[in-house]
Image (spheres, rainbow, N blue to C red):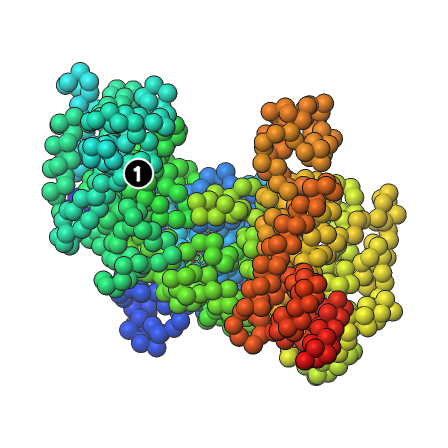
Amino acid sequence: MNDLLKHQKQDTGPVECLGIKFPNEQARREHFLKVLAEKLRDPKFRKQDGFPTGTDEAILAMSDPPYYTACPNPFLQDFVRHYGKQYDPSVKYSREPQTVDVTVGKTDALYKAHSYHTKVPHLAIVPSILHYTEPGDIVLDAFGGSGMTGVAAQWCGLAPLAYRHEVEMEWKKQGKPAPKWGARRAVINDLSPAATFIGANYNIPVDVEAFAKAGKQLLKELEQDIGWMYETTHSDGKTKGQIEYTVWSEVFTCPDCAGEVNFLDEALDEDSKSVRDDFPCPHCGAELTKKKLEKLFETTADPVTGKAIKTAKRVPSLISYIVNGKKYEKKPDSNDRQVLGKIALIPFPASFPSNRMMHAPEEQKKWGDKWRAGSASFSHVHHLFLPRSAQAIGTLWEKANQYPDQRIRAFLLYMVEQSIWGFSILNRYRLRAYSHVNQYLTGVYYVPSQCAEPAPSYNLGGKLDRLIKAFREFRSSNGNALITTGTAANLSLANSSIDYIFTDPPFGDNLAYSELNFIVEAFHRVFTHQGPEAVMSDSQQKGLHEYYRLMKACFSEYYRVLKPGRWMTVVFSNTQAAVWNGIRTALQEAGFVIANVSALNKVQGSFNAVSNATSVKQDLVITAYKPNGGLEDRFVKSEGHIDSVWDFVRTHLGYLPSVKMRAGELEFIQERDPRIIFDRMVAWFVKHGFAVPLSSQEFQAGLMQRFESRDGMTFLPEQAAEYDKKRMQVASAPQMEMFVSDERSAIDWLADFLKKRPSTYAEITPEYMPVVGAAKKKGEVIPELIRLLDENFIQFDGKGEVPSQIHSYLSTNHKDLRGLDKTSPQLIAKAKDRWYVPDPNKAQDLEKKRERALLKEFEGYADAAGRKLKEFRLEVLRSGFKVAWANKDYQTIIKVAQKIPEEALQEDEKLLLWYDQALTRSEGSA
Ligand SMILES: C[S@@+](CC[C@H](N)C(=O)[O-])C[C@H]1O[C@@H](n2cnc3c(N)ncnc32)[C@H](O)[C@@H]1O
């Protein structure tokens, strides 16, 4: 037995769980594991949508019931029944929508304790939980990822005094009473077992001191077992050095002499640590560049299956090592190569995962959206690991897995799994990087030409200390969080049982979670069930419509389980208007009423930068509520009568803030704009299957009669009084925001915005997205922002003089840029990539360019097969009809007109006129 196994199981003393008393945590765990094991044998239980793929044994090994199960948690209802408060309509509850700043807390040690795709920091969530809930309330996040909502809920009871003081002062400034401190309870769900395993380890308490001991012992034993693999000889020829990392380089061939070229060896300039653009071939002297080289492939035996496989040839090029605390670098010598050769002959550890990526059948070459042709393609999990790294991670995993105490075992695995990607060949070698750990590109499987293979101490050493420190300060409690694995569309929760929802769903096609989590899940041997994954994905054949349908199912479930009158905060990152529209519609169709939309994070995103140049991480926050039971009942009884329009508006206005201030100025509250209130009302009627009994004009007129209007916003009488009071204290009325409801108004909004502030795409997006409403006409699409910009505005490419529009904006708004010449490099750097409104001369050119693009699209409409166009742009139709008219091409006008919905034609004067005239003329000529 090794030393790690000698550790005793932790005795925690008596505990109570879901009303049952146990002598200790171990007994509690054994009891619930037995119940879970029985459940797992029930085929009906396993048949649920979203049930992960894995054996009973593997699921039980990950789980710590009832607090965590790596499958739908059968104790969920009991948990909420036991700890929650039943919905009682007589209990008064009222809150105004509050927005979130997701940029907060990204450097916090606890946030950084374990990474996950698009993590929302717990410190960004805490203020919302404090605002919407009371201690002991139950918060839900069913797209919970790494479980930060649970951490935030518990943190409300653990916040240090300094933090509490800061929040209390801030709230006082806003005129709000101090928050009620104390832990809330959380229910965290995710489809991916890799995600919920992180969530569970974040939220379930751990004996940190026991973990510290076990972690140190684990690394020590690893060193004893495989330390020899990471030794090298110093330049003196005798002293032993400890390797930190080894750089592996792919081998290429020279196009002239076909000789082998190690790119790093030939192109690296040692002194400047930079890669030369061109360099001579070491064999024939021909001038080479990276582009000219051809990758060399070799056929080897698969280290696990033994079958012949073709891979890019990769050789060790550089070793970074330490002698007496000092860092050195060397080229691998014959001894190093000998050691590596010896390691390559050792079989991969027995438990090393060798699954085919995404379980793709043998005959199917591609395995998912992240599959790439060429050298980056790999078909099995173990193809991502060099032999020595496979020994390191495999040994670590096996040793951690043998630890007797379940809780410490899970936490050791939680530490070890974080090094998996860093040990793989995805870990890029970046010349001037400060550290060579975890340098993989996030959000994709990108296999670089040069990778850094770290030693375990280099990869994991600091991590252990950081985990110990973070969890010494975060002392969570059992019973405060329950973590479950399954689809958000099917939660075994009672109706109206949740007090608040904070959630961060997948954003269209931004990330392929199940693919990205596959490697870690392969180590756990429990995999995401892809079917209900709410993403847009080519390989899963899920387009916008499927994504929308899946999101709607999830939001409907959220609606069912949330208590009436309660709130949901949805954080959303996507810059595509179509995806954004889909989310908003899905929410409303599920029954939620949107009360606020705001844009936040303006930080440049890091993921998917390779595949999408306009990919910017933009966080929008939607705040929505489930109307209280009264409105719903009255609505159904009235069968959508006209009175229920005003009933809805009255109730809805009650949920909106009366006053919004920013920097001492009153802000325009967009949700009080009559046009938006109309949209919300329409969505509510549509969701309940009733026809809307009023036209937009009738609605506006009725609104004016029944409610108070101030500065373009609608209020209830008592809210208007509150607004008036504030209005008297400030100098000016808030600026009414323009509202984008079709392509024309989108262009107008952009022109207005860019006139005031020539901006980059990343700066425009967060301002633009919240003002975009749904297109008013059925089938009409508002083009994506980048296209609108491209067709109507000009982007400064950084060449030549800075355009005067940008020059005057920058010199007025930036002190340091004042008085600079239009050719000043400093000014050019700041002006580069900004979009601006063209001056009238150039506008003509642009107009021509736009016209050409519109006509091209119009030709597509005319040629499109089928009787009806699913989507169209009014601007395209207008341009197309105009030109066809001028060309006396009446048939094209008629043909296209018949492909668009009748009302789109009827509601657009110009289109109707051309169509009518075309009909008359063509009849005349027939
Ligand atoms: C944006 S991430 C959430 C990240 C999280 N906020 C955090 O801080 O770690 C979205 C998550 O939704 C999960 N997901 C996708 N489809 C789902 C479904 N139908 N039900 C539940 N979770 C789903 C993905 O596995 C992913 O972890």
Residue 655, image x and y in percent? 72, 62
Residue 52 location, quadrant: bottom left
Secondary structure category for the residue under label 1: loop
Q: Amino acid at mark 1?
A: Ser
Q: Is mark 1 within 8 Å of ligand 1?
A: no
Any part of residue 64 in sight? no
Residue lying at 25% horizontally and 35% vertically, measured from the top left = 255
Q: Going by the image, does 506 lie left or right of 354?
A: right
Residue 831 location, quadrant: top right
Residue lying at 77% horizontally and 79% vertically, measured from the top left = 642
Q: In terms of depth relative to the viewer, which is nearer, 502 or 621? A: 621
Seen as rendered, the residue at the extreme front is 925
Residue lying at 69% horizontally and 67% vertically, measured from the top left = 888
Residue 870, image x and y in percent? 57, 70
Residue lying at 29% horizontally and 20% vertically, measured from the top left = 326
Residue 595, image x and y in percent? 68, 60
Where 858 falls versus 217 (above or below)? below
Q: Going by the image, does 131 lie left or right of 184?
A: right
Q: In terms of depth relative to the viewer, which is nearer, 897 or 202? A: 897
Quadrant showing the C terminus: bottom right
Residue 259, image x and y in percent? 19, 33
What residue did someone put label 1 on?
A: 449
Where 466 falls versus 303 (above or below)? above
Where 692 falls versus 703 (above or below)? below
Any part of residue 834 in sight? yes
Q: How many marks?
A: 1
Q: Residues within 10 Å of mark 1 (few under 14, many from 20)?
A: many
Q: In terms of depth relative to the viewer, which is nearer, 450 or 14? A: 450
